[in-house]
Amino acid sequence: MYKRILVAVDGSATSRRAFEAALDLAKAMGSILQPFYVIENTPMYFDAPGYDPSILRNQMIAQGNELAEDMNKAMSAHGVQGGMVTGEASSLDDVPTLVLDAAKAQGADLIVMGTHGRRGFQRLILGSVAERCVRQSTLPVLLIPSAAGTPETDAE
């Protein structure tokens, strides 16, 4: 059903769960899997005295390289084709725009991404990327909640 799957990853536990779900789906369907990592430039700190934006950018690039290595190994171990693609956010291209543009450029049939809970500040900040992708996408978007894969507790 899905020939090419793009999964948005950012190094969080939720995005790891989204990657694992996308990996399982790609293996079951014989799909090509494209993890997508965005290097974010946070302009709010650029005017702070003594702030060097290259430090944060270099750390994000290093994190992306580590993720690419881990995810490419996992894909290879599961016999899934594909590889990490990276984008860089700017004042013109924010994260949701980059995710949707990458899906289009890669010819994706499905976007998989993690989301966070629906409460308060965490939803406002962390869930906004997933929410905007769902609202603006012309492709199906599979959201993996932050609690996915965690054991349920019995309330007795």
Image (spheres, rainbow, N blue to C red):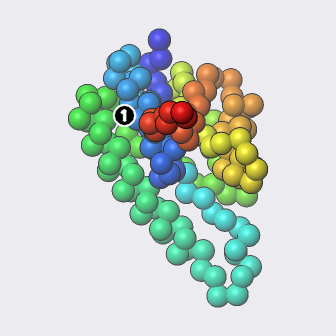
What is the quadrant of residue 134 in the picture?
top right
Kindly identify the residue that appears in the image at 63 percent across and 23 percent down.
139
Horizontal side of 134 relative to 24 (left or right) equals right
Residue ID for mark 1:
82
Residue under the image location 32 percent in, 48 percent down = 70
Residue under the point 38% across and 30% down: 23
Position of 38 relative to 8 (above/below): below
Residue 64 location, quadrant: bottom left
Residue 149 spot, x, y in % from top left: 45, 35
- Dot 1 amino acid type: Gly
Q: Is residue 84 visible?
A: yes
**Nearer-the-camera pick, 145 or 98:** 145
Which residue extends farthest left? 77
Compared to residue 57, the image places residue 70 above or below, namely above
Q: Secondary structure at mark 1?
A: loop
The picture places residue 150, in percent across and down from the top left corner, at 46, 38
Q: Position of residue 135 (x, y in %)?
A: 75, 31
Question: Is 150 situated above or below 2?
Answer: below
Q: Residues within 10 Å of mark 1 (few under 14, many from 20)?
A: some
How far from the left and from the top, in percent, is residue 58? Answer: 48, 69
The outermost residue toward the top is: 1
Q: Look at 32% across and 50% down and name the residue there.
A: 69
Task: Give the quadrant of the C terminus.
Answer: top right
Q: In this orientation, does residue 105 appear?
A: no
126 or 135: nearer the viewer:
126
Answer with left or right where residue 48 lies relative to residue 31. right
